[in-house]
Amino acid sequence: EEFNPADFYLDLISLDTRSPEAEAKTRDRIEVLARNCKTNQEPIPSLGMASASEPEVSKGAASDYRAGKLHQFRVLFGRALTQITRDKIPLMISVFTAVFFALIVGMLYMHMDKNQRGIQDRMGALFFVVVNNAFGQMFAILNVFSKEKLIVQREFAARAYNTWPYYVSKLVAEQPFRLIGPLVFCCIAYPIIGLNGAWDRFLVFVLIVLLLAIAAQTLGIFLGSISKNEEIAANVSPLATVILLLFGGFYVNKDTIPPALNWIEYLSHIQWAFTALCVNEFKGQEGWKCDGFESESNLCDVTGEQILHRLSMDGQTVWEPIISQILLICLLHCGAYWSLCKLQPKFKPLETKKGVSPVKAVKGSDRV
């Protein structure tokens, strides 16, 4: 008969407690194996078994790893690239979702007039662009990273590789593919909605949306890294996103936020993206028509600066929120990397007496 070698060895060293005779027979066999192993044991350097006279290597030292960090980066980059290119279905789903929502928002907001209703419609379209990309990108990376982290932590504990080669290789390999969906969304939705027709405004729009996608993905990695397991991450992420959404600049005017809570808006990637999109769309625009109640009550905004003033976004350039978004991305990356380094599971080390081999330590126990 053919046996799995691992199962065969486990059967040899296991006690058969179905009867006293079988238990005595298997115990004698285990003692013979242990005695022969002690007599014929030879050190195997390739397994990393150090003799008692060799100095101990401190935990976390560079010599704990078999390969250098650059080699680790190359191997991990190849693994991440192979994984994301081989699994084409999530990539196709992200592109299909981007096309679907781009057509939906385009048909909903197309042919907007340059009047007061058009201002409201444009703000609604811009905020939908922000929310759609922020939520979709964050939950997509959170679901994948929370499951992958359990495997990565076991590989960290086995000293297979260091933290930064894994983290950097994952970002470099996966980030370009994860930005395909937002890029497709921008190219389809922007002309259909009929936003600012200048080419430089379109390029800035694409830059803002791509930075928003990166910030949302980084937030997902950060929430996944600080969460102990997938269930905790799934419960924490809605709470974080709702709070950041409330301070996104659309539901509450910036000037009406209580001073004690004002600091939260600086941590909201939604707020920075929405501010940048509004400034990019309205700044320098004139000729907004007044109609209906607005013209009679002198509440009509005819210039882009007046629109931005009502939103408490006047006096800003489009690059100020863009730079703030980049700084927020760097902050989230630092937090995620620190969490992966410091919040790893702790394992109790195996302690053996100096000069005593592991086989001798195991022999004294009746439990096998």
Image (spheres, grey):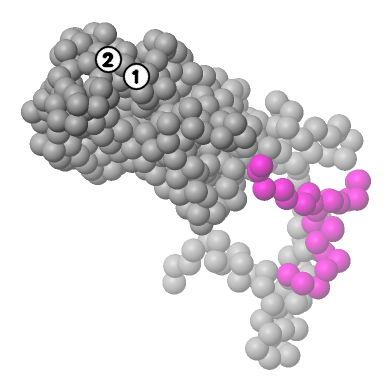
Q: Residue at x 53, y 37 (%)?
A: 222
2 and 1 marks in contact (CB < 8 Å): yes
Q: Above or below — where is 249 with respect to 135?
A: above
Amino acid on which disc 1 is placed: Leu
Q: In the image, which disc is placed on residue 308?
A: 1
* Percent position of residue 41, x then y: 77, 50
* Residues in magenta, as a range: 343-368
Q: Of helix, strand and loop, which mostly describes the magenta segment?
A: loop
On-image quarter of the N terminus: bottom left
Q: Residue at x 48, y 67 (%)?
A: 3
Left or right, 187 with respect to 338, comes to left
Q: Residue at x 13, y 38 (%)?
A: 108
Q: In the image, which disc is placed on residue 157?
A: none
Q: How many marks?
A: 2
Amino acid on which disc 2 is placed: Gly
Do we see residue 61 in this rendering?
Answer: yes
Q: Is residue 91 magenta?
A: no
Provide the secondary structure element on which disc 1 rests: helix
Question: Toward the viewer: 32 or 308?
Answer: 308
Residue 131 in which image quadrant: top left
* Percent position of residue 21, x then y: 72, 89
Query: Dot 2, how many residues are within 10 Å of its Cα: few (below 14), some (14-19), or many (20+)?
Result: many
Q: Is residue 344 magenta?
A: yes
Q: Which residue is the site of mark 2?
A: 304
Q: Above or below — where is 87 with respect to 205?
A: below
